[in-house]
Image (cartoon, coloured by chain):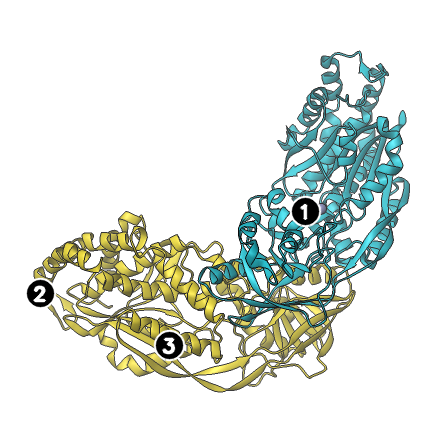
Chain colours: A yellow, B cyan
Amino acid sequence: MKFLIFTYFGVVHLLSLCSGKSIYKNGISKRTFQEIKEEIASYGDIAKAIINLAVYGKAQNRSYERLALLVDTVGPRLSGSKNLEKAIQIMYQNLQRDGLENVHLEPVRIPHWERGEESAVMLEPRTHKIAMLGLGSSIRTPPEGITAEVLVVTSFDELQRRASEARGKIVVYNQPYVNYSKTVQYRTQGAVEAAKVGALASLIRSVASFSIYSPHTGIQEYQDGVPKIPTACITVEDAEMMSRMAARGIKIVIQLKMVEKTYPDADSFNTVAEITGSKYPEQVVLVSGHLDSWDVGQGAMDDGGGVFISWEALSLIKDLGLRPKRTLRLVLWTAEEQGGIGAFQYYQLHKVNVSNYSLVMESDAGTFLPTGLQFTGSEKARAIMEEVMSLLQPLNITQVLSHGEGTDINFWIQAGVPGASLLDDLYKYFFFHHSYGDTMTVMDPKQMNVAAAVWAVVSYVVADMEEMLPRS
Amino acid sequence: MKFLIFTYFGVVHLLSLCSGKSIYKNGISKRTFQEIKEEIASYGDIAKAIINLAVYGKAQNRSYERLALLVDTVGPRLSGSKNLEKAIQIMYQNLQRDGLENVHLEPVRIPHWERGEESAVMLEPRTHKIAMLGLGSSIRTPPEGITAEVLVVTSFDELQRRASEARGKIVVYNQPYVNYSKTVQYRTQGAVEAAKVGALASLIRSVASFSIYSPHTGIQEYQDGVPKIPTACITVEDAEMMSRMAARGIKIVIQLKMVEKTYPDADSFNTVAEITGSKYPEQVVLVSGHLDSWDVGQGAMDDGGGVFISWEALSLIKDLGLRPKRTLRLVLWTAEEQGGIGAFQYYQLHKVNVSNYSLVMESDAGTFLPTGLQFTGSEKARAIMEEVMSLLQPLNITQVLSHGEGTDINFWIQAGVPGASLLDDLYKYFFFHHSYGDTMTVMDPKQMNVAAAVWAVVSYVVADMEEMLPRS
Ligand SMILES: [Zn+2]
Ligand SMILES: [Zn+2]
């Protein structure tokens, strides 16, 4: 298969190689946009070959099958856990066996917080076991737990207005779900705000757009000078029930027990593999997802899908016998969920080379049916990306939207490197995010095929064009 | 409000009273269908008054608020539990305080099975805590649990073909969800079929059309002459994962521990209230839902909604100062989930009166936005029901479909009594059914208003028409 396709499409590839010459000097292109358009259009047959292989050919369902094997074998992959390190070792072997180049691990020190035995029981007005998950970095409770009356609020504003009622209580936030970036403030800041007004603990309504009694965990952040209090997420259902009870004037008492523990930082790695560039090997198009996950479910959606379509992009390009002019670098980040720890370390190590990064790509918002590419970069770069995405006309996925971003690529974007993230059908994403429901059952092999094809076409063409993407 | 509406609509009502006379003898009507049509059409203003009160007036959201108060206060209501008996006592008081007539409790002996500590842990190929719920009536495991290799099958057919592999194993059923009535066979019969081929226990993929890692419990049935083995439901996610592992040839070992217990039958009650008929008080239109639930979640959807729109139907009629010619009887069944135990007892007690039941109604398939009425009865009765439903034109809910049924009314339907059940938007019903997700969060006050209006119009008009519904 590899040889046949190489022979067939090699013609196109070689033609494209011959027609270009390096006229990119000091970051200023002398080429007209029409010339660039024509260059991109010449990748039409390669784009079709990638799509055919990924969506209809021998590679279909491969990223799904590879992902299923990893997450079924390892399970969830929390920062600092043995599972994460096992997954890194397996991926290292996977990438080597796949024949990728320069496969290596880059050391990172990462946080090591562990969930222990934990429970929340409503004692008044009736006995009710409350489903909960401690939030990442939360401290433990005293061994006997914290037993206290509940103050239910629906916003930080309400907490401020009722600050005098909060002392000695457990604050329950029943904030409505607006969107992730707005609502997640309650998860990250809820404990700090509750502690500022004297609360003993805080329970946050899960940041979820839909619930079947599922708690959704995630990181939370203490603040210097503010007492640390234990904090956990509860379900939408229980937050709403306690809100109704409180509105009826019913006294609610909860006993919260958590035996979470923070250990010294652990050794981990960003996992790297490449297809080395044929002409400008020092120049890089970076394709990525994060290998760590939360400690519930399988981390299949967040961000197994992103990891495996990123690997698949390189596999597809390699299987077609293609080698772009610039280096295609796959990075599987570690400890994204703890605040992009692996990505920060990578940036520190490689930022000296920032001028050689043409494009940084991350998929960390699902690999459902893609709707387009989110992009951050100069207007000229955006115009080029629109031409590149027009190569995906056969899949009817050609949109270039704004706000290309990702925890792991934002360091580069802030340094001026163009950045792209996959935008897909997010309808169900926050049904499962950071919950026990983030499993292979959520994933769709056909949708992953399409996502991988988009990822491969974009990364290959940008890596192979004669010039790097222009910056502002 | 009550007085004003009575004055306003009393005219219509009295007119309808005067225009009819009893020409129904020996079950044979001498009236033409045109006369019946005109009689039903005369209820147009009453139907509008009911709709206005329920959907736009002072009664709006009442059934939702009443339901929330009960299920928040009591929680789930398993057959034989203290919660169920508490709920019955509260409802008895509620119905009395509402001013309904002949409020009373009819004794029933009901099963008393209790969930104990229970767990399923995957030991091989990796340690994984499997979410599970023992199925109703399941026996316990030995104290040390049952530790055995897993045989995954996707159907009873596959189990038969692989019968020789089942001995000494834990059978895991990963049957696809087709529809409830087909797929639920695995829950009810899975243990028996597994035991027949020598399995030690069976784990059933939850009967759910969608999952966020939620197990869905329910009743299961042992069979005389077949060894009883412990049986539980697991999530769609874990059933699918084990199916994938088995397909890869991986050996799976599970340790199952269950401390469920069956006690002697307990005392319970069907809860009854009436609006006594003005002209034919011995004749009955029965309106019903079941008060018991499973022991997880709040039993808000199954069948709190059915109970509370049924009560609401009588409340609306009473609040409008209406009193139909025949008796409107509200019955809140006990122990439906154990196989219609309360309904069977009620039938035994009242079947002598079967010829006086004009219509039996049950809502036990959700109180989401109604799409129409499911009806079982003679063609003549169906034609009449179509006219009655045309009164709901203002809500655009006029369909009369086939298959009126319900565990609690089927005894009557089989004895020839016309039966009606509420059909509503079932899209999400089996997301939540018998799971921790069956809570008030699922319920929509506006949808309950509409369901209650449909329920009230149908029950009132059929109870007030000059003639009983004709039988075959
Ligand atoms: Zn992520
Ligand atoms: Zn039911």
Image quadrant of residue B133? bottom right
Q: Earlier in the sequence, mark 3 or mark 2?
A: 2
The residue located at (55%, 84%) in the rendering is A262
Q: Quick check: is the Cβ at mark 3 less than 8 Å away from ligand 1?
A: no
Residue holding disc 2: A21
Bin the neighbour count of mark 2 within 10 Å (Cα to Cα): few under 14, some 14-19, many 20 and up: few
Camera-side residue: A56 or A195?
A56
Q: Position of residue A330 (x, y in %)?
A: 30, 71
Residue holding disc 1: B445
Q: Secondary structure at mark 2?
A: loop
The residue located at (30%, 79%) in the rendering is A104
Q: Position of residue A68 (x, y in %)?
A: 43, 63
Query: Disc 3 vs disc 1: which is toward the camera?
Result: 3
Q: CA distance from mark 2 to mark 1?
A: 68 Å
Query: Disc 2 vs disc 1: which is toward the camera?
Result: 2
Check the image and name the residue furthest to the front. Answer: B164
Amino acid type for the residue under numbered disc 3: Ala
Compared across the picture, whether A390 is left or right of B222 comes to: left
Chain of the residue displaying label 3: A
Q: CA distance from mark 3 to mark 1?
A: 47 Å
Bin the neighbour count of mark 3 within 10 Å (Cα to Cα): few under 14, some 14-19, many 20 and up: many
Compared across the picture, whether A291 is left or right of A453 comes to: right
Asked if A256 appears above or below A58 in the picture, the reply is below
Compared across the picture, whether A294 is left or right of B429 comes to: left
Camera-side residue: A256 or B147?
B147
Q: CA distance from mark 3 to mark 2?
A: 34 Å
Camera-side residue: B393 or B158?
B158
Amino acid type for the residue under numbered disc 1: Pro
Residue holding disc 3: A343
